[in-house]
């Protein structure tokens, strides 16, 4: 079998009046870079690369530089191809766009390799510890009018009660855009609304200095917050270590970290309790398995980050299937030693409408596809509808 052609797709959906904010930016649209690898025997692999950044640079890396190297190659050697592409781009692409492009190609190659032998990627990687995974809601973003705190608190009550009524066990909330006490007040209202039994996770999207993050951690301590995601900028390893040592809440990070080398420094450096590689960012399945081994050896839990389209969710689910309980226990508990999966609640047609069978919650869980490769098929009409190129 040989790779015959490689095609890039840029997808875009404006969010209209469903715009939202994290601590870093306004989100006016959903976008995504998808790659389709076709083989001479008719098998087609799908991959996705990148997350928040514009998809065009990822497409340029694939189209102009990496794809020509793969034409005529055997697609069932994704680890070997990963190594070649990374060694080629190391001098100018150790992090960022090139690794996102390699991620997309790697996911598509594993998709083909699985289809070639009739196995899901999770079985190709060694076996499934689970067939479904507990989903957590990501919501309670900031609205366009984030200066009006009383209105924000009223809306939070409404939104958080929805997640409670649907039956989520965990709710991830954005923090970091407002003053520490105002964000603590938002969390207090959410805790009062959802009651004591739903775990609150918070995500600062690296909005704080180490000193502010430590203070915020102490303000949140009595609200039973279970996880503090990206407290400081990813480059600030010392800041991560300080926050982890001096604040009472477990620290998570890694959604904008790349390859086994980046995670060696993040995990080996004692920066996080929970590592969050994104399959479409960190280097695909090949990098993920290396990061998983690193994390496991350091006693660090892995919860893949996922943001993009249904392809990225499918890749994350295949990866989640192969994560053992860390540490091992006869009764794995979600978040404690059993992975969970992010299920963002903001409008995302690229996730909810792109596939022939889209992902839906079943009793608070997402089922992990067990068909060959990624186990999903793209709905061609939907793809054409979202295509911007
Ligand atoms: Ca995040």
Image (cartoon, rainbow, N blue to C red):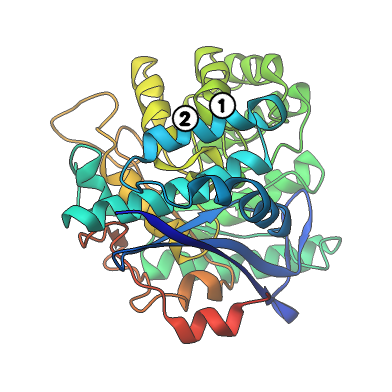
> Label 1 vs label 2: CA separation?
6 Å
Residue 332 visible = yes
Q: Is residue 336 above or below residue 69?
A: above
Furthest residue toward right? 147
**Residue at 29% over, 36% down:** 323
**For the residue carrying disc 1, how many other residues have a C-alpha within 10 Å: few (<14), some (14-19), or many (20+)?**
few
Q: Is residue 165 above or below residue 125?
A: below
In this view of the protein, which residue sits in the foreground, 369 or 333? 369
Which of the 4 quarters of the picture holds residue 256? top right
Residue 56 in the image: x percent, y percent?
Answer: 72, 59
Q: Name the residue under label 1.
A: 87
**For the residue carrying disc 2, how many other residues have a C-alpha within 10 Å: few (<14), some (14-19), or many (20+)?**
few
Q: Name the residue under label 2.
A: 83
**Residue at 22% over, 36% down:** 332
Question: Do the CB atoms of the residues marked 1 and 2 lie less than 8 Å apart?
Answer: yes
Furthest residue toward front? 72
**Residue at 64% over, 41% down:** 98
In this view of the protein, which residue sits in the foreground, 352 or 239? 352
């Amino acid at each position: 079998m040989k790779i015959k052609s490689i095609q890039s797709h840029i997808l875009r959906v404006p969010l209209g009046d469903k715009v939202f904010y994290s601590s870093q930016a306004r989100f006016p649209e959903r976008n995504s870079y998808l790659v389709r690898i076709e083989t001479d025997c008719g098998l087609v692999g799908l991959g996705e690369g990148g997350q928040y950044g514009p998809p065009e640079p990822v497409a340029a890396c694939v189209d102009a530089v990496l794809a020509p190297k793969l034409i005529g190659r055997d697609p069932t050697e994704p680890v070997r191809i990963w190594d070649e592409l990374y060694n080629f781009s190391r001098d100018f692409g150790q992090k960022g766009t090139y690794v996102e492009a390699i991620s997309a190609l790697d996911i598509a190659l594993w998709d083909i390799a699985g289809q070639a032998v009739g196995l899901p990627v999770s079985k190709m990687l060694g076996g499934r510890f689970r067939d479904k995974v507990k989903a957590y809601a990501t919501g309670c973003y900031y609205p366009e009018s984030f200066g009006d705190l009383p209105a924000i608190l009223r809306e939070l009550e409404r939104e958080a009660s929805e997640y409670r009524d649907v039956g989520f066990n965990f709710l991830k909330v954005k923090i970091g855009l407002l003053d520490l006490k105002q964000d603590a007040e938002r969390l207090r209202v959410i805790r009062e609304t959802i009651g004591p039994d739903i775990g609150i996770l918070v995500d600062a999207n690296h909005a704080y200095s180490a000193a502010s993050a430590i203070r915020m951690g102490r303000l949140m301590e009595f609200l039973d917050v279970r996880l503090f995601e990206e407290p400081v900028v990813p480059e600030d390893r010392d800041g991560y270590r300080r926050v982890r040592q001096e604040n009472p809440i477990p620290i998570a990070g890694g959604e904008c970290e790349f390859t086994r080398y980046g995670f060696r420094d993040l995990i080996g450096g004692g920066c996080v309790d929970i590592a969050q590689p994104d399959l479409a960012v960190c280097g695909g399945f090949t990098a993920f398995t290396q990061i998983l081994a690193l994390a496991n050896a350091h006693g660090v839990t892995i919860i893949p980050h996922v943001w993009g389209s249904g392809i990225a969710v499918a890749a994350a689910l295949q990866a989640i299937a192969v994560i053992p309980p860390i540490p091992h226990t006869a009764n794995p508990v979600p978040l404690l030693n059993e992975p969970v999966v992010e299920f963002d609640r903001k409008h995302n047609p690229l996730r909810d409408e792109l596939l022939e069978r889209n992902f839906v919650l079943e009793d608070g869980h997402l089922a992990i596809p067990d068909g060959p490769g990624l186990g999903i098929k793209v709905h061609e009409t939907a793809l054409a509808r979202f295509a911007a190129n």
